[in-house]
Image (cartoon, coloured by chain):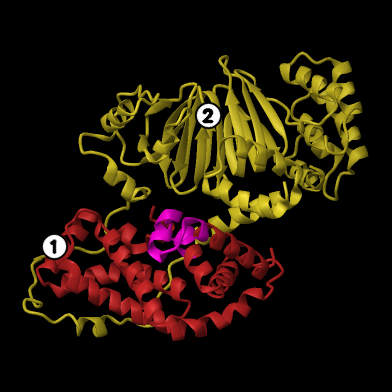
Amino acid sequence: MICNEAQKKVDELVDGSLVGRERDEFERHLLGCPECRSYLDWVRWLSVAARALPEMAPARDFWQDISGELAEPGASVVCLADHKAIGSRRRSPLPDIHLYRRALIPRLGKAAALVCILLAFGFALMLVSDEPVAETGWSVKWESQGGAQERGDLAAQLSVGQMMETDSRSTAHIEIASIGQVEVRPNSRVRLVESHENEQRMALEKGVIRALILAPPRLFFVETPSALAVDLGCAYELSVDENGNGKLEVTSGWVALEYDGIESLVPAGAVCTSRPGRGPGTPHFPDAAPGFKAALAEIDAGSAGTAAIEAALAGARLRDTLSVWHLFARVEPRVRPAVYDRLSALVPAPEGVTREGVMQLDPTMLSLWKGELQAHW
Amino acid sequence: MSINPALMGNQGASDPEEVREWVACAQAGDTAAYERLYRIYVRRIYSLCYRMLAESDWAEEVTQEIFIKAWTALRSFRNESSFFSWLYRLAVNRVLGSIRENRRRVARVFTAEDRVLEQHPGRRTSTEENLDLELAIAGLPERARLVFVLYEIEGYRHDEIAALLGVAEGTCKAQLHRARLLLRKALGR
């Protein structure tokens, strides 16, 4: 794919109009093209920055000029005995974000309307919650195989507490408030957990989602049975199988996978699996040596002996410092010196990082070293 | 279109019930109630005008026109949408009308395209970054700027922008791409 053309695809990806095979092909291109990834990062930054621009005030108050033009019979009428102070009450979260979309929902209730609309069109949507419909929600567009694309303008609303499921032929495109999009792939089940200005949170119970988030870090969260995916400004695919095992593949930016005090930081191009009860595994790049990946799998399963850890360390390339750095918090304290030695052989510890500090998992030192390593990831 | 919540300003802090009361009173001719509405929305409307027109005097002039026009048209407001949505739509149409009526001024503004080619290297504070971004947006060519402002800041969709500007949706997308490239160059990213 030529990059000039590919960069237009970035626009389509960000706008949510790039779907299906074309999107797959483009995401593969992104993984191997730093120029396009850089452009994607720029577009994401620009979108966030533009939306965060503050209001501007005119240089002067021109109400007097305006009021002089308002004269008409009855203009001196005062019909409110008590004009209340402006802004005296707390604003509701995400006020009127979906003004037009809301107008489409009949008054019989959003949940019921959603069911009626989708049944009428034969789409596979199931709402399985009886919880009251919340004030805020996400808008959903549906795409189905077999000629239903013409109905792609069918809009619906997913409210807090509601769950929806795609069948083998349908895909849902969710607009996450004003911060990004999530594509819910076929045979997937998701639930909207929270939607307010400081947090957008969904649960992926099974299936696959693709997220593209244009927001400051830690605003968008996806709960899975095995880990919590925390957006750090990114595009990624997250899947959950029938047993609750998860797999994260990051296309752009960073995602954190968290569970019970364990955290994996996954950059663009890397993958990370997770298991119920164990949380996220060690992130790694797919092009790592098979022996290295097999050793990591043993470590993540908790069944690794010294031989497996030695194999992982011996097989690590410069790029695999991503995984090696994560091993500090995953291996027993007695093994940490070996991890330290291997990592410092690949990329020396920067100033301010000591062996003793790393042995104690000093977060500042680990962060400093990670900063040095990132150039190779 | 989804209204950008970051730009709701005082509008977001006002009570919808109170706004409805003031609107009803203003519809009955109460200028004091209309002043309340003006004070809630003037910054929001001025921001829209400035970013679309890229000239402060012109933006102030059009902002005044919008509030005068909204007063005269107020009786046609039926509460089918929020007052802000109605005012906002009226404002966008008035700005675009003003651009059509003022081709000479527009031409003068667009000679400022060179500004977008200025480089702003180095690390900036967020306030400086905002200022740089505002300047760079103001320096964009007309079409690219209008599409960028309506899409990225105001939350319009491409099909809505295409209808407003009377162009094809593909043209909107191309202009947005152009704006992003020009802004990247201008901001040295």
Chain identifier, yellow in the render: A
Quarter of the picture holding the C terminus of chain A:
top right
* Amino acid beneath label 1: Ala
Question: Disc 1 marks which residue?
Answer: B24
Which of B29 and A139 lies nearest the eye of the viewer? A139
Instruction: Tell me the crowding category of disc 1: few under 14, some 14 to 19, or many 20 or more residues within 10 angstroms, Cα based.
Output: many
**Residue B163 is covered by the magenta coloring:** yes
Residue type at the position of mark 2: Arg
User: Please, which residue is most extreme toward the front here?
Assistant: A147
- Per the image, is A172 magenta? no
The one nearer the camera, A214 or A1, is A1
What secondary structure is found at the residue carrying circle 2? loop
* Chain B drawn colour: red
Magenta span dominant secondary structure: helix
What residue lies at 54% left-to-right and 70% top-to-bottom? B137
Is residue B21 rendered to the left or right of residue A154? Answer: left
Q: Residue at x 37, y 62 (%)?
A: B9
In magenta, the rendered stretch is: B149-171
Q: Is residue A191 left or right of residue A313?
A: left
**Frontmost residue, A11 versus A375:** A11
Q: Is residue A86 left or right of residue A121?
A: left
x and y percentages locating residue A75 in the rendered image: 10, 77
Q: Position of residue A53 (x, y in %)?
A: 49, 64
Vertical relation: A40 (above or below) A318: below
Residue A94: x %, y % from top left: 38, 49
Chain at numbered mark 2: A
Residue under the image location 79 percent in, 23 percent down: A296
Q: Is residue B73 above or below residue A61?
A: above
Residue at (61, 19) in percent of width and height: A245
Relative vertical location of residue A292 with respect to residue B107 in this rendering, above or below:
above
Does residue B157 appear in this view? Answer: no
Residue with the mark numbered 2: A185
